Image: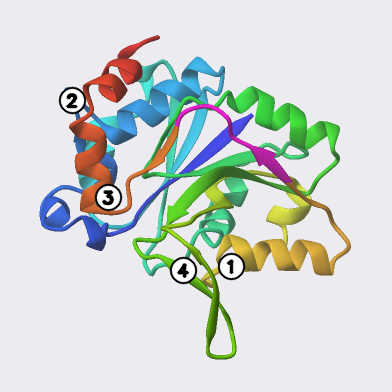
Amino acid sequence: MKAVVLAGGQGSRLRPYTFTVPKPLLPLGDRPLLDYIITHLARCSIKEIILALGYQAELIRAYCGDGSRFGVRIDYVQEHTALGTAGPLALCRPLLNPGEPVLLTNGDIVTRLDFTELVRFHRDHEAQLTIGYHHHTYQSPFGVLQLSGDRVVGITEKPKLIHPISAGIYCISPEAVSLVPADTPLTMPELALKVQAQGGKVAAYEIKEFWRALETRDHFEELTQSDEIMEMLQRP
């Protein structure tokens, strides 16, 4: 089983932190974010990892090397233009194991997900693409009115809405990987539509374990300032 980590984004919403440091190398305590991702993949017995690089690729290569420091093997592919969340799979195709699904994760995610359970679910459900999802709560900062014409018939104070959101973690079968065009930007939602158009199955796997995406400065600061979360990430 191989995993692809998307580590090529510019992290523009995390600036100024990412002006000089690529997002995957931002520090969480005494280790970079990417260190946590690779270490957790290895903990789940995934020892062959492909890093899809772009922005400041040389810094990531210098830090990760061949992967031996993590007890894994790391290969690299290089995006010369932004290819989206699915497009890099075309670059990875020559490195993938024939007949095996591949894991793909965004390089800005911290999770305790058991990746082996995701793969087992994917195979058991005979899916071509499985999307990991997490329940996220949105809370309105305002009271919401229920109207009938110009009459107020109800008021809900700061309601909460819970949505299943894509967690940026996927298991992808060879049939789906083959649908990714070379040198063409493609997102995972677009790949999912391609799979469905071919009659394939797109499954959803709920991530019940800890999961955080570090997409903005607020996300990063919330995570790094939480002693409880940082302590949890240090556990084996």
Q: Determine the CA span between mark 3 and mark 4.
A: 47 Å
Mark before the other along the chain sequence, 1 or 3 = 3
Outermost residue on the top side: it is 236
Q: Residue at x 24, y 61 (%)?
A: 13
Query: Under tag 1, what secondary structure?
Result: loop
State the residue position of label 1. 182
- Asked if the residue at tag 2 contacts the one at tag 3, i.e. Cβ–Cβ closer than 8 Å, the answer is no
Disc number lying in front (3 or 4): 4
Magenta region: 204-210
Q: Determine the CA span between mark 4 and mark 2.
A: 40 Å
| Quadrant of the rendering where the C terminus is positioned | top left
State the residue position of label 2. 29
State the residue position of label 3. 57
Toward the viewer: 40 or 174? Answer: 40
Residue type of the residue flagged with mark 1: Ala
Q: Is residue 13 left or right of residue 80?
A: left
Residue type of the residue flagged with mark 4: Val
Q: Residue at x 48, y 19 (%)?
A: 42
